[in-house]
Image (cartoon, rainbow, N blue to C red):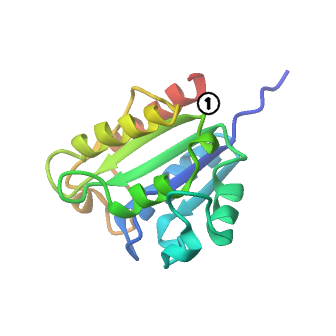
């Protein structure tokens, strides 16, 4: 008897082009795909560029609604890859959260991964974002890998060291049972 693994939407939490967050989100997607999870990958760099089309603080604009319908609503499990910006998380991620009605998050489960070029791996940003997710009724997995000095971790081929891959695999083990 085979068990179908849950689909996971992986969200890269910055709108920077050529970001380390997107690199890490792609690595995480590869891990999940190899384990048999159907996955989706969305980068906040693909958000609409003007507030009229985003529609925060009310009903989303049509472009934002299409993003919600494709990358949030079909998934019970969401995985956020969040870089450290000024001791927290990127403003575009907060704008994204403000552009999605809380009912579209209710009852979902989330896993968080932090990264930084500094020493904390975005510890404060992950804690703050987990609080926001709890507010919109998302259950957040306790296991939150933090990859510090991220730029120096990647080898010439863009691969992570074994210990970091083990950490990400361990998180996925927990997320599957969550």
Residue at mark 1 = 107
| Front-most of residues 35 and 43 | 43
Instruction: Identify the residue shown where x is 70% and y is 65%.
Output: 66
| Place of residue 85 in the rendered image (x, y in percent of width and height, measured from the top left) | 24, 59
| Front-most of residues 94 and 7 | 94
Residue 169 in view in this figure: no
| Front-most of residues 142 and 57 | 57
Q: Using the rendered view, name the quadrant where residue 67 is placed.
A: bottom right
| Place of residue 35 in the rendered image (x, y in percent of width and height, measured from the top left) | 63, 40
Instruction: Identify the residue shown where x is 61% and y is 62%.
Output: 60
Residue at the outermost left position = 119
Q: In this view, does 87 lie above or below 157?
A: above
Residue 17 in view in this figure: yes
Q: In this view, does 18 lie above or below 118?
A: below
Q: For mark 1, give the secondary structure.
A: loop
Indicate the quadrant containing the N terminus: top left, top right, bottom left or bottom right.
Answer: top right
Residue at the outermost right position = 1
Horizontal side of residue 66 vs 116, given as left or right: right
Residue at the outermost front position = 58
Horizontal side of residue 154 vs 152, given as left or right: right
């Amino acid at each position: 008897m085979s068990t179908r693994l849950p689909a996971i939407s992986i969200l890269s939490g910055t709108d920077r082009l050529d970001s380390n967050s997107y690199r890490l989100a792609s690595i995480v997607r590869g891990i999940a795909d190899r384990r048999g999870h159907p996955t989706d990958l969305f980068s906040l760099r693909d958000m609409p560029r003007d507030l009229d089309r985003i529609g925060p603080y009310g009903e989303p604009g049509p472009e934002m609604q299409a993003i919600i319908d494709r990358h949030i609503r079909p998934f019970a499990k969401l995985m956020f890859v969040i870089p450290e910006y000024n001791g927290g998380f990127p403003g575009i991620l907060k704008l994204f959260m403000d552009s999605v009605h809380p009912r579209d998050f209710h009852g979902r489960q989330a896993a968080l991964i932090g990264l930084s070029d500094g020493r904390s791996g975005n510890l404060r940003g992950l804690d703050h974002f987990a609080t926001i997710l709890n507010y919109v009724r998302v259950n957040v997995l306790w296991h939150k890998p933090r990859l510090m000095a991220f730029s120096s971790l990647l080898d010439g081929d863009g691969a992570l060291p074994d210990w970091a891959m083990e950490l990400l695999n361990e998180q996925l083990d927990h997320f599957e049972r969550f």
